[in-house]
Every structure is written in C-alpha cells, then in structure tokens.
C-alpha cells in the first residue's frame, strides 16, 4: 500500500493523553457531586467527541442520575480545566516522532484530524512535534463536524490535490475507522490507543499494527 498522505488521529495514536484526560474529567465529576472513575477504566469511556465522552462517564456513574444542567456544567468545567492543565503525563508514544520524520523525509504529506479542540491540538502539536511539518491540522471547531463525519477528510484531500486512493487514515478507535469508511479511504488501525477489538473489523481497515514503526512499511509499501 503506497500512499502520498497520512491523516493521523491525535489522542491514542500520536500522543498518550489518557492519564491527564482522566484526571481532569474526574476533578470535573467530583466538583458536581459525581463519583470519579478509576483511570485504568477510561479506555472504556474515551472515543468520539466530547459530548459522547461526557455522556459515557455520566451514564456509568451509577450513584447519581445526571441532569442536563450538570452535563453542561461538567463539559464546560472540563474544557476549561484541561486547557489550563500542565498535562505532565502527556507525551508522544515511543517511536512516533521517528516515524513522522521518516515519512516526512520520503515526501509523505502529514496531516491531523481529531475531535480534540483545535487550540489544544495545535498547542500539543507544537510542543511535541516542532520539527514536523503538518500540512493541515483539523481539530474540533465550529468549522467542521465531529468525526466520523468525513468533511475534514474531503477538505484535506482538496487542499493537497489528492485522490482517495492516495490517502490513508491512521487511528486507534471506532470514530477513526468509521471516518475513513465514510470518506472512502483506507485506514490503519493501531492497537496502542483506546480502541476496542471490534473496531479493527471495520471494512476500511487495511492493516492492524502493534508498533509505530510498522506505519512506515504500510504507507511506503511492503
């Protein structure tokens, strides 16, 4: 599978953010009287946009039935808290930076499409990937619907003057492989993030990989 462009998910694919995300969500839940969840269980709740994640956290909070008012308060408090948080546990997955450099040196266009807020995605990308040129970084904003809507993929495709067969989506979860399916492009499913076993069965998945270095072979061709 030789491709000209890679579209990367962010959380769970490029960067391990789960611990700081869990800590901030737990503080938000506790502030409004809901029980926190063990950090190790957050893999079960993360995936999709913020609305989906907050819903998952509250639905599985058996001690207290949530209200729409609390839902909005928790969502807004989390956004503010996470934006200000120093994110001391957040870092790229081992080997990812090297993979990006290899792809970049081989002329592969690198892009990001995530449901993470745009300003946060840009901030963390600048922090961890300063030597990498991303042609497009599309996070959550009013300009784009959340994944798995393929609007951002089509925009990237148009801006790079590429065809569907030139692109591949690299991600760790259901929203990623579904986005690829909706856009009609191939996807690479990575097992080191928050995805579930059934996610890799999506028809868009061409490769299932266990280590970042495997991305290179998938993209450049075996």
Image (tube, rainbow, N blue to C red):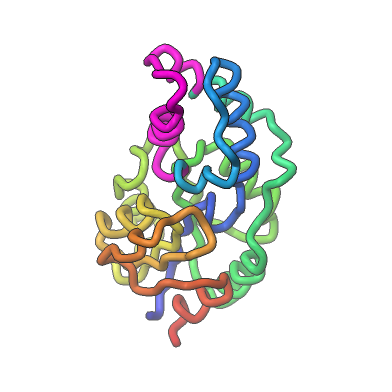
The picture places residue 213, in percent across and down from the top left corner, at 58, 75
The picture places residue 212, in percent across and down from the top left corner, at 57, 70
**Is residue 190 one of those drawn in magenta?**
no
Choose between 33 and 5: the one closer to the eye.
33
Q: Is residue 21 above or below residue 110?
A: above
Q: Is residue 125 above or below residue 162?
A: above
Screen quadrant of the N terminus: bottom left
Q: Residue furthest front?
A: 63
Q: Is residue 20 above or below residue 93?
A: above
The picture places residue 51, in percent across and down from the top left corner, at 40, 31
User: Residue at 37% of width from left, 38% of height from top?
Assistant: 144
Identify the magenta region: 46-74
87 lies left or right of 66: right
94 lies left or right of 118: right
User: Residue at 58% of width from left, 47% of height from top?
Assistant: 40
User: Residue at 45% of width from left, 37% of height from top?
Assistant: 140
Any part of residue 8 in sight:
yes
Screen quadrant of the C terminus: bottom left
């Amino acid at each position: 599978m030789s491709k000209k462009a890679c579209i990367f998910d962010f959380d769970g694919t490029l960067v391990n953010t789960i611990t700081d995300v869990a800590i901030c969500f737990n503080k938000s839940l506790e502030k409004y009287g809901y029980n926190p969840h063990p950090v190790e269980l957050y893999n079960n709740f993360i995936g999709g946009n913020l609305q989906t994640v907050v819903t998952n956290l509250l639905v599985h909070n058996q001690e207290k039935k949530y209200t729409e008012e609390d839902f909005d308060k928790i969502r807004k408090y989390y956004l503010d808290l996470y934006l200000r948080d120093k994110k001391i546990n957040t870092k790229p997955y081992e080997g990812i930076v090297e993979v990006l450099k290899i792809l970049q040196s081989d002329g592969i266009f690198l892009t990001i499409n995530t449901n993470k807020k745009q300003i946060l995605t840009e901030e963390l990308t600048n922090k961890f990937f300063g030597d990498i040129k991303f042609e497009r970084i599309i996070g959550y904003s009013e300009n784009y619907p959340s994944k798995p809507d393929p609007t951002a993929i089509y925009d990237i495709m148009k801006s790079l003057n590429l065809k569907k067969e030139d692109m591949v989506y690299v991600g760790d979860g259901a929203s990623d492989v579904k986005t690829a399916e909706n856009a009609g492009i191939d996807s690479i499913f990575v097992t080191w993030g928050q995805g579930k076993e059934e996610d890799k069965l999506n028809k868009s998945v061409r490769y299932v990989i266990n280590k970042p270095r495997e991305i290179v072979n998938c993209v450049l061709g075996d």
